[in-house]
Image (cartoon, rainbow, N blue to C red):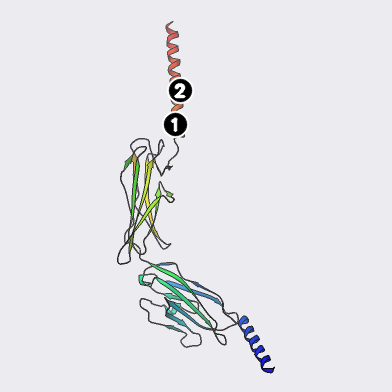
C-alpha cells in the first residue's frame, strides 16, 4: 500500500513539473527568400515557463551547423557545414545569422529547443528558405507591330533572362496592370537556372481620343528582386486605340460619336436654312 501511494505521489509530482516547468509556443522565423550574397537572420522564439534552457540547435536539412548551450563555455559552437558562414558575434539563444548566403543554401532549416532537467522537454520546428540568384539583365519586351488600326490583333512578348528560381512576369498597358491575361512559359536549364517568357494578346478597340498604346512588363522573384523593361509605344494609324482582350484602356466609343453626330445635324440644319433663305430672297 505504501509503495502504491509513493508511486502515485511521484506521478503527481512529475505531472505538476510537466505543466509548471515546460517548453511552449516554439516558433521559427526564417526568411522565405533572400538574395545571394546577403546575410540571412534566422529566429527561434519560445516560452520556457519556469524551466531552464538546456540547448538551442540549428540544422539545415537535418545537418547541425549551430549550437547554443548556456551552461557551457563558450556557450556557442559552430559546426563546419559547406557554404554556411555563421556570424557568431550576432548569434545567440534566439537567433543565428548566416553571412553572405550562397545559392547552395536553399533548403529546409530546423530549430530545436530543449529545456533543462528534469524533463528535458524538446521541440523542433522547420521552415524553407530560398536563396535567389537574380537575372543579370532586365526583362525585354517586343511586339509584332508598332502601329495598329481598329480590329488589329497585337501580340507582345516579355522575356526574363535565366535566374534561380524563374521570375514572375506582370504586364502593364498604359500604366494599368493587366490581371491574368498572360500565358507564361518557363524554360529550365541543366544548371538549375530558368528563364521566363510571357505573351500578352491585345485587340484594337474603336474610337478613342488616346492615339497610343504603351506596353511594358515587370519581372519579380518573391519580394526580394524586381526589375522593369523599357516601354514600347504603339501608335494608331487612325483614331483606334487598343484594349487588352476587349478591355478598353483609353475610353468608350459613345462619348466620341455623340459630338460628331450633333455636329453633322447642325451642319444639315444650317444648310437647309441657307437654301430656304436663298430661295426667299430670289422671289
The picture places residue 178, in percent across and down from the top left corner, at 42, 49
Q: Which residue is mark 1?
A: 257
Question: Residue furthest toward the top?
Answer: 283
The picture places residue 99, in percent across and down from the top left corner, at 39, 74
Say the numbered circle drawn on residue 200.
none
Q: In the image, what residue occupies the spot 45% across and 29% down?
A: 259
The picture places residue 256, in percent across and down from the top left corner, at 44, 33
Quarter of the figure with the N terminus: bottom right
Question: Residue furthest toward the front?
Answer: 1
Packing grade of label 2 (10 A; few <14, some 14-19, many >=20) is few
The picture places residue 258, in percent across and down from the top left corner, at 46, 30
Give the vertical position of 171 relative to 275 (above or below). Answer: below
Question: N-terminal of the two: label 2 or label 1?
Answer: 1
Quarter of the figure with the C terminus: top left
Give the vertical position of 237 relative to 57 (above or below). Answer: above
Give the vertical position of 72 relative to 134 (above or below). Answer: below
Mark 2 → mark 1, Cα distance in angstroms: 15 Å
Question: Residue furthest toward the bottom?
Answer: 2
Q: In the image, what residue occupies the spot 43% across and 24% down?
A: 264
Give the vertical position of 12 relative to 110 (above or below). Answer: below
Q: For marks 2 and 1, give the one nearer the viewer.
A: 1
Q: Which residue is mark 2?
A: 266
Looking at the rendering, which quadrant does residue 251 occupy? top left
Foreground: 85 or 181?
181
Badge 1 marks a residue whose secondary structure is helix
Packing grade of label 1 (10 A; few <14, some 14-19, many >=20) is few
Badge 2 marks a residue whose secondary structure is helix
Looking at the rendering, which quadrant does residue 243 occupy? top left
Foreground: 273 or 114?
114
Amino acid at each position: 500500500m505504501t509503495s502504491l501511494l509513493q508511486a502515485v505521489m511521484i506521478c503527481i509530482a512529475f505531472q505538476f513539473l510537466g505543466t509548471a516547468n515546460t517548453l511552449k509556443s516554439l516558433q521559427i522565423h526564417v526568411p522565405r527568400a533572400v538574395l545571394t550574397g546577403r546575410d540571412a537572420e534566422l529566429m527561434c522564439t519560445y516560452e520556457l515557463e519556469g524551466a531552464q534552457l538546456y540547448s538551442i540547435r540549428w540544422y539545415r536539412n537535418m545537418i547541425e551547423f549551430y549550437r547554443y548551450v548556456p551552461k557551457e563555455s563558450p556557450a556557442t559552437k559552430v559546426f563546419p557545414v559547406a557554404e554556411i558562414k555563421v556570424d557568431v558575434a550576432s548569434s545567440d539563444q534566439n537567433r543565428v545569422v548566416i553571412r553572405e548566403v550562397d545559392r547552395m543554401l536553399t533548403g529546409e532549416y530546423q530549430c530545436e529547443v530543449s529545456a533543462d532537467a528534469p524533463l528535458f522537454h524538446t521541440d523542433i520546428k522547420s521552415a524553407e528558405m530560398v536563396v535567389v540568384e537574380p537575372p543579370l539583365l532586365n526583362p525585354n519586351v517586343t511586339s509584332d507591330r508598332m502601329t495598329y488600326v481598329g480590329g488589329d490583333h497585337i501580340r507582345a512578348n516579355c522575356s526574363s533572362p535565366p535566374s534561380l528560381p524563374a521570375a514572375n512576369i506582370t504586364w502593364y498597358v498604359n500604366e494599368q496592370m493587366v490581371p491574368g491575361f498572360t500565358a507564361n512559359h518557363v524554360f529550365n536549364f541543366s544548371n538549375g537556372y530558368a528563364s521566363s517568357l510571357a505573351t500578352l494578346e491585345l485587340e484594337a478597340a474603336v474610337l478613342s481620343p488616346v492615339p497610343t498604346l504603351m506596353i511594358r512588363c515587370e519581372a519579380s522573384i518573391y519580394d526580394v528582386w524586381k526589375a522593369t523593361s523599357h516601354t514600347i509605344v504603339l501608335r494608331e494609324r487612325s483614331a483606334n486605340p487598343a484594349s487588352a482582350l476587349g478591355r478598353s484602356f483609353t475610353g468608350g466609343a459613345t462619348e466620341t460619336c455623340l459630338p460628331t453626330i450633333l455636329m453633322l445635324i447642325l451642319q444639315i440644319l444650317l444648310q437647309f436654312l441657307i437654301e430656304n433663305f436663298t430661295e426667299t430672297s430670289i422671289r
